[in-house]
Amino acid sequence: MLQRYRKLSLWETLILAKGKLRRLFLTHFRKGYVERQKQRLRGECIRCGICCNFVITCPWLDRSTQPATCLCHETKWLMCRTFPIDERDLRDRHILDPEHPCAYYFVSWEELEAERKRDASQP
């Protein structure tokens, strides 16, 4: 069962709301940026459901299963399917649960380039 999070301050709520609007804007109007950032994304979703609790709890989040399940996974919103877009999203998530970091992380552009060179040099 997902935990109940502490009561957020007004400032924290505003940060999360701003992040939600930013993700909505980026996924619909800055698709190139989103695609470039996805190249740096590493890790896997552990289905903790924390990102489904920004500002409001997603009504399609099934808390009765462990791990949590998205009831509209195949057709969920674009901004949900692309989470996290960049490090700012992980910082937003950290506001809700700082004790349990997200399993996703981003490599730097330099690390990404080194990976590409390494992969290109292997037969």
Image (spheres, rainbow, N blue to C red):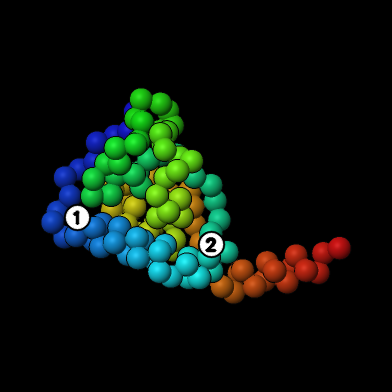
Distance Cα–Cα, label 2 vs label 1: 26 Å
How many C-alpha atoms fall within 10 Å of the one at disc 1: few (<14), some, or many (≥20)? some
Which residue extends farthest top?
64
Q: Is residue 101 visible?
A: no
N-terminal label among 2 and 1: 1
How many C-alpha atoms fall within 10 Å of the one at disc 2: few (<14), some, or many (≥20)? some
Q: Position of residue 54 (x, y in %)?
A: 28, 49
Say what amino acid the circle numbered 1 marks: Thr
The one nearer the camera, 111 or 32, is: 32
Q: Which residue is found at the position 36% from the left and 61% from the top?
A: 23
Q: Which numbered tag is attached to residue 38? A: 2
Q: Position of residue 72 (x, y in %)?
A: 42, 38
Q: Is residue 109 visible?
A: yes
Q: Please say if 88 is above or below 104.
A: below
The one nearer the camera, 114 or 70, is: 70
Q: Which numbered tag is attached to residue 13? A: 1
Q: Which residue is found at the position 29% from the left and 44% from the top?
A: 53
Q: Please say if 61 is above or below 111.
A: above
